[in-house]
C-alpha cells in the first residue's frame, strides 16, 4: 500500500471514530456534517473550497496538506472540533472563542470553514477573523506570502518564497519556476475585463496552485490550476497574465515527515 493510501486509510479511521462520538464539540457546528465532509476531503482533497469567504490562502494550504498527509490534516480538524485548538507540526492553532461560537451559515461546507478560519484567526494579531462574510471578513482574511509559507513549512514542506507584493514577476518567471507552485495573482486574471480591471489588478489578492507548466501559445498563456474547490484550465491573454502574476511559493510535492509522525 502506498504511503498516501495508508495515511488515507488511517485518516478515514479517525473520521469514523470522530463521527461515532456524541460529545458536544467546541464549535457551533454539526458533528455529523463535519465528519461527512472530512471523509469526502480525504478521498478528494481538491474539493475543499472557500465559497465567498476570502480564505484562498488557507484553502490552498489545506488542499495540499489533505492530499499529501490526510491523517495529519484530519487529526488537526478533529482536535479543533473537540478541544478548540490544534497544531500543524509545531505551529499552534488557537482560534478565538468568538470564532468558535459563531453560528456559521456561509457557503462553503462547515468542516472546510472550520479548518481554514481557525488557521487564519489564530495567525492574526490585530484584526481577528470572527465573521463569515462582509468587509470585516475580507480584511481579516487577507493572507500574505509569509503566512502561507509558514503554514506550509509547519506542515513539513520545503518552501522557497519567490513572490513580490509590488513588482510583477513576469511570464519568464512563471515558466522557469520549477516544481509545484502556489502562485499569488490578481484575481482579475480570471474575470472579464471591465473598467476596473487594470486598477484592481494592481493588487495581488488571490492564491492558486499551478498544476502544470505555464505554456505560451499563439492565443496567449495556457496552464492548469487549482482554485475554488476544483482544477481548471485557463487560456489567458499574455498581457493579462503578466499584469496579474506576482510570483509563487515553490514547494516540494511531498511534505517531509513530521516529528513523531508515521510514514
Image: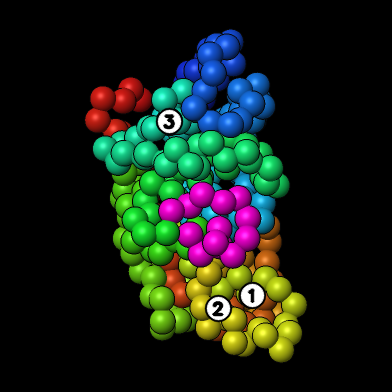
Residue where numbered disc 3 is placed: 84
Q: Which residues are magenta?
A: 128-140
Q: CA distance from mark 2 to mark 3?
A: 38 Å
- At 26% across and 25% down in the image, what residue appears? 260
Place of residue 259 in the rendered image (x, y in percent of width and height, measured from the top left): 24, 30
As drawn, is 117 to the left or to the right of 154?
right
- At 39% across and 32% down in the image, what residue appears? 85
**Magenta-colored stretch includes residue 136:** yes
Q: CA distance from mark 1 to mark 3?
A: 36 Å
Q: CA distance from mark 1 to mark 2?
A: 7 Å
Q: Nearer the viewer, mark 2 or mark 3?
A: 3
| Residue 263 against residue 206 in the figure, above or below | above
The tag earlier along the polypeptide, 2 or 3, is: 3
As drawn, is 58 to the left or to the right of 19?
left
Kindly indicate whether the residue at mark 2 contacts the one at mark 1 (C-beta within 8 angstroms).
yes
| Residue 129 against residue 41 in the figure, above or below | below
Residue where numbered disc 2 is placed: 244
The local secondary structure at tag 2 comes to: helix
Place of residue 22 in the rendered image (x, y in percent of width and height, measured from the top left): 57, 11
Amino acid at each position: 500500500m502506498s504511503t498516501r493510501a495508508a495515511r488515507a486509510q488511517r485518516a478515514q479511521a479517525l473520521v469514523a471514530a470522530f463521527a461515532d462520538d456524541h460529545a458536544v464539540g467546541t464549535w457551533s457546528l454539526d458533528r455529523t456534517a463535519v465528519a461527512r465532509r472530512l471523509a469526502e476531503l480525504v478521498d478528494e482533497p481538491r474539493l475543499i473550497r472557500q465559497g465567498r469567504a476570502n480564505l484562498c490562502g488557507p484553502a490552498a494550504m489545506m488542499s495540499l496538506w489533505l492530499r499529501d498527509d490526510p491523517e495529519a490534516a484530519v487529526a488537526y480538524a478533529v482536535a479543533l472540533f473537540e478541544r478548540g485548538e490544534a497544531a500543524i507540526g509545531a505551529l499552534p492553532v488557537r482560534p478565538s472563542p468568538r470564532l468558535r461560537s459563531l453560528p456559521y451559515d456561509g457557503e462553503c461546507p462547515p468542516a472546510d470553514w472550520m479548518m481554514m478560519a481557525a488557521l487564519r484567526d489564530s495567525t492574526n494579531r490585530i484584526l481577528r477573523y470572527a465573521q463569515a462574510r462582509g468587509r470585516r471578513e475580507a480584511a481579516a482574511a487577507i493572507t500574505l506570502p509569509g503566512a502561507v509559507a509558514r503554514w506550509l513549512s509547519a506542515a513539513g514542506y520545503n518552501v522557497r518564497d519567490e513572490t513580490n507584493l509590488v513588482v510583477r514577476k513576469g511570464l519568464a518567471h512563471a515558466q522557469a519556476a520549477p516544481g509545484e507552485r502556489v502562485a499569488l495573482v490578481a484575481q482579475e486574471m480570471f474575470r472579464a475585463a471591465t473598467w476596473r480591471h487594470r486598477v484592481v489588478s494592481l493588487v495581488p489578492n488571490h492564491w492558486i496552485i499551478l498544476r502544470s507548466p505555464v505554456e505560451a501559445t499563439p492565443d496567449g498563456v495556457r496552464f492548469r490550476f487549482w482554485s475554488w474547490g476544483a482544477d481548471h484550465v485557463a487560456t489567458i491573454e499574455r498581457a493579462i497574465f503578466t499584469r496579474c502574476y506576482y510570483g509563487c511559493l515553490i514547494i516540494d510535492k511531498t511534505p517531509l515527515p513530521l516529528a513523531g509522525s508515521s510514514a
